[in-house]
Image: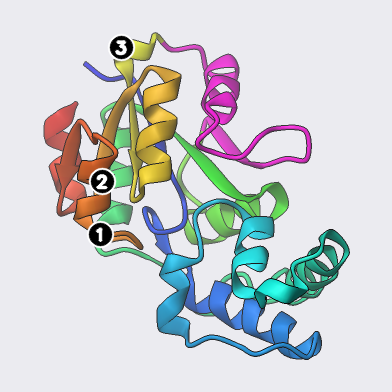
Amino acid sequence: MKKLVIFDLDGTLVNTIDDLGMAANQALTRAGMPTHHISSYPHFVGNGITKLIERVMPVEDRTEAKIAEVRGYFTEYYDQHLTDMTRPYQGIEQLLEQLVARGIAVAVASNKYQSAAEIVVRRIFPDIPWVAIAGQLPDVPVKPDPSIVFGILSEHPTPKSEVLYVGDSGVDMETARRAGVESVGVTWGFRPESELIAYYAEHIVHSPDAILDLL
């Protein structure tokens, strides 16, 4: 019996691509750089905002100073538009409600910077009693480093055998593997099922309610 389910945020609980892409394109425009079609952004995200900014910038402009400048433009815009178009995936709200009703703790582990992760989660899921909302912090390595999972387990001590980690990408599957917890790959997010297979997802589900069968 699982006692704790840790969810990735972007691409797993909520579809944030439109808001992320809009913020990145606004930042690129402000910096005088070419933008990208929103449909290309699922390939850019997954490793934190700094890596996103680096990936969308022209190669010749990817200096540390320039990346920091464009990231500043991004966060300035994104902080004001976090949930303009962001919505939960179909069935996620019902899944979370059922987990809570069964007495199973739920947490978030995201590479989105901490303040943004907290705002998105609290706005979209205001009635869910999260035991932890862990976003990216300056002194904590981003996923797939497992530190974020260990931090959650320190906040809500749970045997690793009683933990499920749910995510939509190879980064998430590798995070779970390094943390020593059971991984669940979801196919409704930003990455193809082939990536989940390549990163040895222990389970792959095609709908949120299928996660209930893994408890």
- Residue 93 percent coordinates (x, y): 32, 54
Instruction: Please say whether residue 86 is visible from this viewpoint.
Output: no
Residue holding disc 2: 196
Taking the spot 83% from the left edge, 63% from the top edge, the residue there is 68
Instruction: Report, in whole angstroms, how far the alpha carbon at label 3 lies from the one at label 1.
Output: 27 Å
Q: Which residues are magenta?
A: 131-158
Residue holding disc 1: 192
Looking at the image, residue 7 sits to the left or right of residue 133; the answer is: left
Q: Amino acid at mark 2?
A: Leu
**Do labels 3 and 2 touch, CB within 8 Å?**
no
Quadrant for the N terminus, please: top left
- Residue 86 percent coordinates (x, y): 48, 71
**Do labels 1 and 2 touch, CB within 8 Å?**
yes
Q: Amino acid at mark 3?
A: Ser
Q: Amino acid at mark 1?
A: Pro
Residue in the foreground of this view, choosing between 4 and 58: 58
**Do labels 3 and 1 touch, CB within 8 Å?**
no
Q: Which mark is residue 93?
A: none
Kindly report which numbered mark, 3 or 2, lies closer to the viewer in this rendering: 2
The colour scheme applied to this rendered structure is: rainbow
Looking at the image, residue 40 sits to the left or right of residue 115; the answer is: left
Looking at the image, residue 175 sits to the left or right of residue 215; the answer is: right
Taking the spot 33% from the left edge, 44% from the top edge, the residue there is 96
- Dot 3 or dot 2: first in sequence order is 3
Going by the picture, which residue comes out furthest to the top?
Answer: 159
Residue holding disc 3: 161
Give residue 133's quadrant in the image. Answer: top right
- Dot 3 or dot 1: first in sequence order is 3
Looking at the image, residue 191 sits to the left or right of residue 19; the answer is: left
- Residue 42 percent coordinates (x, y): 42, 68
Instruction: Report, in whole angstroms, how far the alpha carbon at label 1 lies from the one at label 2.
Output: 7 Å
